[in-house]
Amino acid sequence: MSWDALPPRPPMLHPEAGPYAERVLELTRAAQLRTRPVLDVSYGDDYWQKLDIYPPARTAGEPVPVLMFLHGGAWTCGYKEWMGFMAPLFVDLPAIFISVSYRLSPESKFPEALHDTQDALSWVWRNIGAHGGDPGRIALGGHSAGGHLAALSVLDAEGLAQRGLPPDVVKVCLPVSAPLDLRAPPDCRDAGQQRAYRDFLAHEQDDVRASPIARARPVETRFLVAWGENDFPRITMQGPLMVEALSHAGVEAAGMQLPGASHFDTSLNCIQAGHPWTLAARELIAGMPWPARRAPLAAASRIQGQS
């Protein structure tokens, strides 16, 4: 996608969202100058069904792990260029970083963004080998609405099976500041929840099917669920509950509260040297085993004890 052709974004719900969007676009421009990405790869026929592939910083001699990441924007705005700034944090592992766009609401309502995420995952699983990636070591994450879609994609067994994907196609899931429970009674919905029911969900009864916490089930994927200390109240509440629900289902899951971080800081601050989330995510991605060599969830286990 040409920088001059980026579509205008609709009005954003939160006053910090606009400055966040401008900052991450600036950072992504700089990252693309350093990382030689393959841009605007189509995984579907729609304008929004595209991804950017950031190759590893050095030749590894064998296939490298892959991190797919989805942008936020309350399901109504944003594009893959919001997340490209993260690429330098991972390509030097070495690993491949992939930023994904998906169809936005209210033009495209649930489950279309979920379908796009799983279609992008299917494309990566089938094609990333041509770019030096290992389809057996894929991590999937996202910020805010993107983290919601990442978690839901892993837990939606039917969607994975319909695409011929193995149930453990995603080895590590990294939702950051994600809304993980969309269910809310009509008389006590905050502004974000009202927007989700109005713009994202096609029908009110879809709130259960669209809530990762309500779909926790046994999966081989390891989860690291992160949120900011000063995040939106529903996010700080739902993060620990999601870890608990996954753990009760027998999933390796850990939570990570980022001290002093707001909803947007959890994304922006990850480029700081020594940032705890980046250190943990890098360790999990670098340690993703080949299918026959499953390693313990060392990084996330430590974090869970601290959160």
Image (tube, helix red, strand yellow):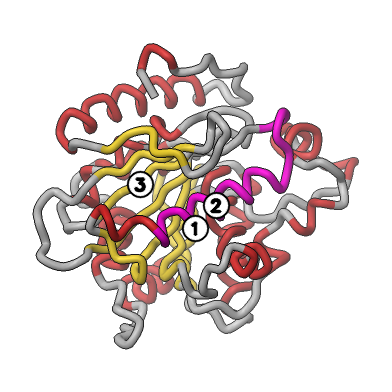
| Mark seen at residue 157 | none
Give the magenta range.
105-126
Q: Nearer the viewer, mark 1 or mark 3?
A: 1
Q: Residue at x 30, y 42 (%)?
A: 86
Amino acid type, callout 2: Asp
Q: Is residue 273 above or below residue 157?
A: above
Q: Residue at x 63, y 33 (%)?
A: 104
Q: Dot 2 lies on which element?
A: helix
Foreground of the two, 267 or 121: 121
Amino acid type, callout 1: Ser
Q: Dot 1 lies on which element?
A: helix
Q: Position of residue 139 (x, y in %)?
A: 39, 61
Q: Is residue 41 above or below residue 7?
A: below
Taking the image as shown, residue 217 lies to the left or right of residue 43, namely right
Q: Residue at x 38, y 76 (%)?
A: 301
Q: Furthest residue to the right?
A: 187
Within 10 Å of the Cα at label 2, are there few (<14), some (14-19), or many (20+) other Cα atoms? Answer: many
Query: Mark 2 near mark 1, Cβ–Cβ under 8 Å?
Result: yes
What residue is disc 1 on? 122
Q: Is residue 42 above or below residue 220?
A: above
What residue is disc 3 on? 98
Q: Position of residue 205 (x, y in %)?
A: 87, 52
Taking the image as shown, residue 175 lies to the left or right of residue 93, namely right
Q: What main secondary structure does the magenta stretch of the protein show? A: helix
What residue is disc 2 on? 119
